[in-house]
Amino acid sequence: MFHKENGSDLKVSRCAMTKIVKRDLGISSFKRKKVYFLDQLVKEKRAARCKGALGRYAVENLEKILFSDEKIFTIQEATNIQNDRILALSPSKVDEKSRYVSRIQNPKSLMVWAGVSKIGRTSLVFVPQGVKSIQLIIEKWFWSQY
C-alpha cells in the first residue's frame, strides 16, 4: 500500500508519476471508508442483546413481526442549473420561457409503503401527501390478517 509519497526525491514530475502508478503498475486510489469502532466490550454487549432478542421472539410469535419500509418519490422534475445548459450565440437570442427555471419550496411528492411478514407481503400503499403518520395504515393491514 502506498501512502502520500511524491516523486520529488526521485526527480520525477507529478504527471509522469501519475502515469507510472496508474498505467504501468495498475494501482488506483481509493477513499478510506469510515466504520464504527467496535472494541471487545461493545461486541459482547451486541451479542448479548441479539441473544435476548432471539429469546423474546419465539417461533410462535414470528407471525406478529412486520418488516416495513417507505420511500418518498418526488414528482416534480429536479433541475441542476450547472448541468442544464442552453446553447445559443447570446443570451438575448434565447426566448424568455427557456431562459429561466422555476423552483418551489416543497415539491410535490408521493410516499409508497410496503411490508413483509411470515404470513405474506402487503400490497403497495400509496400514502396521500400531507399524511404525517402511516401507523393507522400499517395497523389496518396488520390486524386485518388475523
Image (cartoon, rainbow, N blue to C red):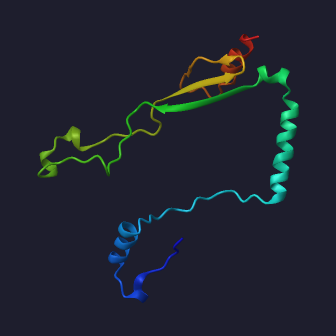
Q: Judge by depth and name the residue closer to the eye, 102 or 71.
A: 71
Instruction: Point out residue 71 in the picture as x, y percentages from the top left corner.
Output: 55, 32
For residue 35, which quarter of the picture? bottom right
Q: Is residue 107 above or below residue 135?
A: below
For residue 125, which quarter of the picture? top right
Q: Quadrant of the C terminus?
A: top right
For residue 76, which quarter of the picture? top left
Q: Judge by depth and name the residue closer to the eye, 125 or 28.
A: 28
Q: Is residue 9 above or below residue 66?
A: below
Asked if residue 100 lies left or right of residue 8, the reply is left
Asked if residue 110 lies left or right of residue 134, the reply is left
Q: Is residue 54 above or below residue 13?
A: above
Asked if residue 61 lies left or right of residue 82, the reply is right
Asked if residue 39 lies left or right of residue 130, the reply is right
Q: Quadrant of the N terminus?
A: bottom right
Q: Judge by depth and name the residue closer to the eye, 62 or 7.
A: 7
* Residue at 58% over, 59% down: 33
* Residue at 51% over, 73% down: 2
* Residue at 44% over, 66% down: 27
Instruction: Point out residue 88 in the picture as x, y percentages from the top left corner.
Output: 14, 49
Instruction: Point out residue 39 in the picture as x, y percentages from the top left corner.
Output: 79, 60
